[in-house]
Amino acid sequence: MRIIQDALAAPEQTVTRDAFYPTLERILILAPHTDDAELGCGATIARLVEAGREVYLAAFSRAEASLPLGSKPNRLGEEFVKATDTLGIVEERAVIYNYPVRELTYHRQEILEELIALRCKIKPQAVLLPAATDLHQDHQVVHLEGVRAFKDITVWGYELPWNHVTFSAHAFVTVQLRHLQKKWDALKCYESQFELGRSYFSWEFIAGLARVRGTQVHEQYAEAFEVIRVKC
């Protein structure tokens, strides 16, 4: 198994910034729905923000059809704003589109055009998006169109275990407890998802998965990624 540890992370202790991607300053995270980025790579986002990197986040659906009964339509959008603020993402660097949940397949060309516009505006040096083996139909669209739009730069896929039959953990970003706590604080902003009883919205799950991934690289905590392309 090929391990590229800390490739997207800030320097800590004896690890210098020049050890990995010395010019990496702008990272774009793609999320099919409002909570996917926080679930898949929230601790990594926290570490990147802490390191002073420019982190951009684009979510493609407010998932209005997946809200608890009686919720106002923009509830997840408002929760997204609180969550990204909790992670420290600058307000102008977080964008949310309003494509209908579970129907991104019907909007592939529009989504590709949105991605190309982001590419031209942000000029990211790395993109994090759902992994290739994510089975959710919306996640597949964002993965495929994301790889299409950003095929000439570094692209990694984050894991959402409940959507995978298999997942190739090629790269591990080690994180500290404070980064994991930031991730959890961001997830707590999604009160609507706690109301729905999502099993993966729990500290036990978030910390447990981070411990498993950390153990794989002899660290306390980590988040794992599929390596799709690397440009150094």
Image (tube, rainbow, N blue to C red):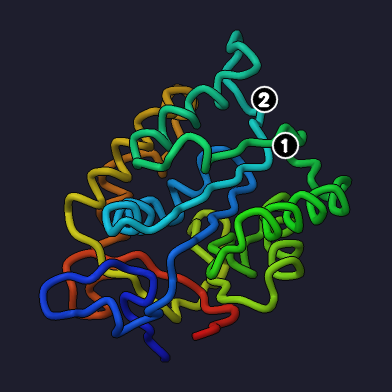
Q: Residues within 10 Å of mark 1 (few under 14, many from 20)?
A: some
Q: Which residue is mark 1?
A: 101
Residue at 60% of width from left, 8% of height from top? 70
Q: Residue at x 52, y 43 (%)?
A: 93
Left or right, residue 173 beside residue 139: left
How far across and down, in percent of the image, does residue 8 sit?
Answer: 38, 70
Against 133, residue 179 (above or below) is above
x and y, in percent, of residue 121 in the image: 66, 53
Comparing 17 with 39, the one in front is 17
**Separation of disc 2 and disc 1 at Cα?**
7 Å
State the residue at coordinates (55%, 26%).
Answer: 76
Which circle's residue, 2 or 1, is located before the other in the chain? Answer: 2
- Quadrant location of residue 199? top left
Q: Is residue 221 left or right of residue 165?
A: left
For the N terminus, the quadrant is bottom left
Left or right, residue 42 beside residue 215: right
- In depth, the one of 210 and 171 nearer the eye is 171
- Secondary structure of the residue carrying tag 2 is helix
Residue at (51%, 40%) from the top-left corner? 35
Describe the element under mark 1 as helix, strand or loop.
Answer: loop
Position of 142 relative to 5 (above/below): above
- CB of mark 2 within 8 Å of CB of mark 1? yes
Q: Position of residue 213 (x, y in %)?
A: 31, 69
Crowdedness near tag 2: few (<14), some (14–19) or many (≥20) residues, C-alpha within 10 Å? some
Q: Which residue is mark 2?
A: 64
Residue 224 vertical placement versus 18 (above, below): above
**Amino acid type indicated by mark 1:** Val
In the rendered image, residue 154, in percent from the top left (x then y), is placed at 56, 76
**Amino acid at the residue labelled 2:** Glu
Which of the numbered marks, if any, corresponds to residue 228?
Answer: none
